[in-house]
Image (tube, rainbow, N blue to C red):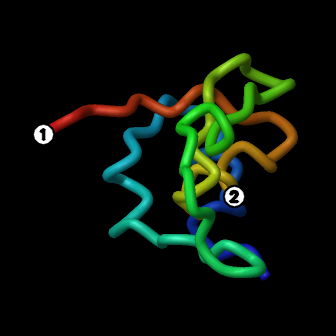
């Protein structure tokens, strides 16, 4: 189920900050955590906007699953 704020058209058309999507939603690794975690295994390139997506953060994954989204503005605070 997709949260309401991800479904709104105006949300998809405008540039959004990662912090606008709420607090981090950490994902869980199926089969337990890996012994040797390689950061390259945690990212994929979004085929729609070309941005790198951190699969450990469900907010990013859900955002990039929307068909007409803009890249997320990721601000490190």
Q: 10 Å neighbourhood of mark 1: few (<14), some, or many (≥20)?
A: few
Image position of 11 with respect to 16: above or below: below
Q: Secondary structure at mark 2?
A: helix
At 73% across and 33% down in the image, what residue appears?
Answer: 44
At 32% across and 52% down in the image, what residue appears?
Answer: 19
The answer to whether residue 20 is left or right of residue 70 is: left
Name the residue beneath numbered marker 2: 62
Quadrant location, the C terminus: top left
Q: For this rendering, which residue is in front, 36 or 9?
A: 36
Image position of 8 with respect to 26: above or below: above
At 83% across and 25% down in the image, what residue appears?
Answer: 48
Image position of 58 with respect to 2: above or below: above
Q: For this rendering, which residue is in front, 42 or 4?
A: 42
Q: For this rendering, which residue is in front, 37 or 47?
A: 37
Residue at the limit of the structure toward the top, as seen here: 50
Name the residue beneath numbered marker 1: 77
Q: Position of residue 26 (x, y in %)?
A: 49, 71
Quadrant location, the N terminus: bottom right
Q: Secondary structure at mark 1?
A: loop
Q: Position of residue 62 (x, y in %)?
A: 69, 58
Tell me where residue 68 sits by quadrant. Answer: top right
Residue at the limit of the structure toward the left, as seen here: 77
User: CA–CA distance between discs 1 and 2?
Assistant: 22 Å
At 76% across and 29% down in the image, what residue appears?
Answer: 46
Q: Position of residue 69 (x, y in %)?
A: 71, 35
The answer to whether residue 16 is left or right of residue 5 is: left
The answer to whether residue 3 is left or right of residue 17 is: right
Badge number at residue 11: none
């Amino acid at each position: 189920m997709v949260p309401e704020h991800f479904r709104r058209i105006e949300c998809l058309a405008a540039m959004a900050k990662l912090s606008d999507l709420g607090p981090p939603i950490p994902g869980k690794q199926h089969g337990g955590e890996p012994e040797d975690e390689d950061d390259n295994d945690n990212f994929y390139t979004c085929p729609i906007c070309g941005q790198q997506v951190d699969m450990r953060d469900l907010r990013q994954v859900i955002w990039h699953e929307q068909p007409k989204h803009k890249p997320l503005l990721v601000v490190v605070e």
